[in-house]
Image: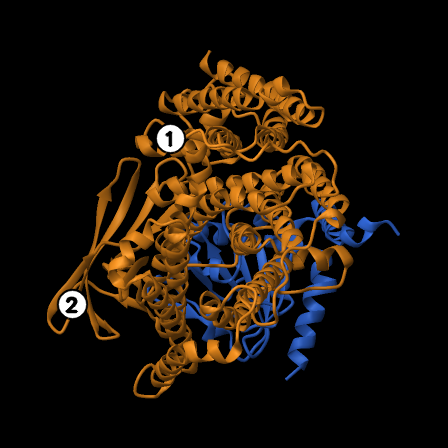
Amino acid sequence: MPAFARYLAPLLAFLALAALLYKGLDIDPRTIPSPLIDKPAPAFKLPELKHPDKFISNADFQGKVTLLNVWATWCVACRQEHQNLVLLRQKGVDIYGLNYKDKRPAAEQWLQQFGNPYIVNAFDADGRVGIDWGVYGTPETFVIDKHGIIRHKHIGPITLNAIENEILPLVKKLREAN
Amino acid sequence: MIPELGHFALILALCLAVVQAIFPLVGSLNRTPSWVAMARPLAYGQFVFLAFAFAALVHAFLTDDFSVMYVAQNGNTDLPTIYKVSAVWGAHEGSLLLWVFILSAWMIAVAAFTRSLPDVMVARVLSVMGMISIGFLSFLLFTSNPFERIFPAPLQGGELNPLLQDFGLAVHPPMLYMGYVGMSVAFSFAIAALIGGKLDNAWARWSRPWTLIAWMFLSIGIVLGSWWAYYELGWGGWWFWDPVENASFMPWLAGTALIHSLAVTEKRGAFKRWTVLLALLAFSLSLMGTFLVRSGVLTSVHAFASDPARGMFILMFLMIVIGGSLFLYALRAPGISRGGGFGILSRETLLLGNNLLLIVITSLVLLGTLAPLLYDAFDWGKISVGFPWFNSMFVTFTPLMILLMGAAPLTRWKHQDGAELLRQLRIALLISVAAGVIVALPFAAGTWAAGLAVGLSMWLLTTLLTSAWRRLHHRGGLKALAADFSSRGGRSYYGMWFAHLGVAVFTIGVTFVSQFDVQKDVRMSPAQEVVVNGYNFRFDGVKPHQGPNYVAQRGTIRVSRDGREVAVLHPEKRTYKVQTKPMTEAGIDATLFRDIYVSLGEPLGGGDWALRLYYKPMVRWIWLGGLLMAFGGLLAASDPRYRLRMLAKLSGKPMPSDTLTAGGQA
């Protein structure tokens, strides 16, 4: 073994790191999971979209399995997924909305036009609650269990496939759990 | 025309960089003095061309030349002049231009302030810096040209991101880059020394002031970033463990380790391999930070322009620079002589302990930053690394580090008698334990965390005072202070003193603001009053307000305590004309011991607004501590002994002969 072999360790460590970074270039960073999984949903209190003088907070989620869908009218992918949310609602899933960095009239018109799958919408005009929730793009959907713990985060539009294989089985499982 | 000249200047700078990377280095190896002598003029030349290119881009912004795509994207006629200038580095291409411009500034600083060093050494250092310059200039020219034109030119620009239209953020990137890029000087010195195969005390002494100055800028840059996040993002946090923040924090940690390790190498000739490795590491982490920010590998609130092609380029560059330098290290390390030995209890051991702790923390920050990537790459499932993980890591290692930090300045080099050390430390120990216990008692702060923090800060303070007292006692008491301050090695000592004091101040700030801040979300009608932590907040409504390039809703909140008015705050919600992004401007009343912080939420109809009210104790101490550390770095860098050789040369005394040892076995 040549004398310098002992001192190759830093180089080898760096090469391993570089290989990881190389692989990272191909990975879509949007699939990076939320640090909030299995943590209590961040506390918030926001005015409702329709009734600015009424407030909605975490307390509204307690005791049932809910979805919190982050959406905005300026978001094209949200329009894509909207009909699937309506479908989810028809299948009896409780969906709350977080209307993110949006305008009230635009959002209300959207709901009239495309249907309203939401029990109620929270209005987060400057996206501050979105920041607490680690939202970095719309749409995003959180699945919250009966105890207000975030169990899953779906990034990007909810597809039919995601409904069948991801959302519905999880909601069923969480409803059966204590 | 001027943008084209700017582009051309960049190309010329690249040509000079190529020459600078090759000739002085080759000349230093085959002993061709004329090639060695090329190093300095080439560095000056590069600086001139890059300064011209930079000025050309500034000019394009000032004259609203929207035919330049970068200006069209980030400039706007309505921008206040200061933000037209800072818009130059407000996005990817321009900030990269700032990066290379600063690199060339460091190069001419090296060229100008190393007259006393052997020419061969300087030639090699500048050659290595030239190589780095090649990498960044070609990155700029081939993937991110800031002078690209668009046709037809739009009539109005897209405007600088409103988040960046702020004084703190106008000066934050240049400071940070001064730090990042400054680490390239220590890196280049290390590579030059490895090439020559001669790592000695002189090398450590030459590297130290450069490292200190770079570290100072990095500290200021990080403090500015944290301060900005605090008042601009509107939710009162000051550090978010965001990947991009971590990217600036890791080189800082490694740089801190390097400063201390360099001290040991200079004074005792020990830790040579370790020091040289740290010098490589500190700059490598700076480069890695650039990669993480620019490649889009990690998501972050800083989300800059990200592009996989750029990521690939930087990764290749990292492979060459970091991989190459670590390979050189592996080749040369066996030939590096061991330094002076030292006992189990000695200043060397304590410094080594702290060095290891700093590197452990650096590795953990790196691991935490890359963990999502790591898990994704290996399909290990999901992982969450957030605040709690980083914080618990910090709470674990920092107390240990502070304990060592307090004792080290009182410990002798080489060998220290344990009983003697304990005797010197007992008063400090007694005071700090007592202070900690008192604070932890229920009638005071009442939490063990506050007690621990106060105890540790007291420990730093009392040991620093003990050490200063002992130092001055030997030199003739307090009246010797001025003489000691300007003596050889004096400012190094007092620099350490202030930097360590900064750590004490920082610790207090962090602990108190995390333990005792009070936050209240309220709905308020005009003339309504709310009490938070003894302060009475009276809401006097919201009025429209017209800014230069935004319109704002401007609230008025009168804060009083015991009937006396403390402050009138004006939090704002701004809407910028072009980007129409709503921005919050917090209203802050700052004093040394507490901040009162109000941010405006949503209008709730009928003149009612949602408001966030905060009481934040000691939050200023966080940044004050950081600034003290930076001041310490500056003081230490100005130590007269770094200039002695220069003075000796000026006065015509003989210098040790230049070394042209090409072999590695020193």
Tag 2 and tag 1 share a subunit: yes
First-in-chain label (2 vs 1): 1
Circle 1 — which element? helix
Q: In this view, which residue lies farthest toward the top?
A: B1
Label 1 is found on which chain of the structure?
B
What's the mark number on residue B560?
A: 2
Total marks shown come to 2
Circle 2 — which element? strand
Assess whether mark 1 and mark 2 are in contact (beta carbons under 8 angstroms). Answer: no
Q: Quadrant of residue B596?
A: bottom left
Which amino acid is tagged 1?
A: Val
> Can you give x and y, in whole percent of width and height, for residue B317 in the image?
68, 36
Examine the rendered structure and indicate whether residue B129 appears above or below residue B248: above
Which amino acid is tagged 2?
A: Ser
Q: Which chain is orange?
A: B
Residue to which mark 1 is pinned: B85
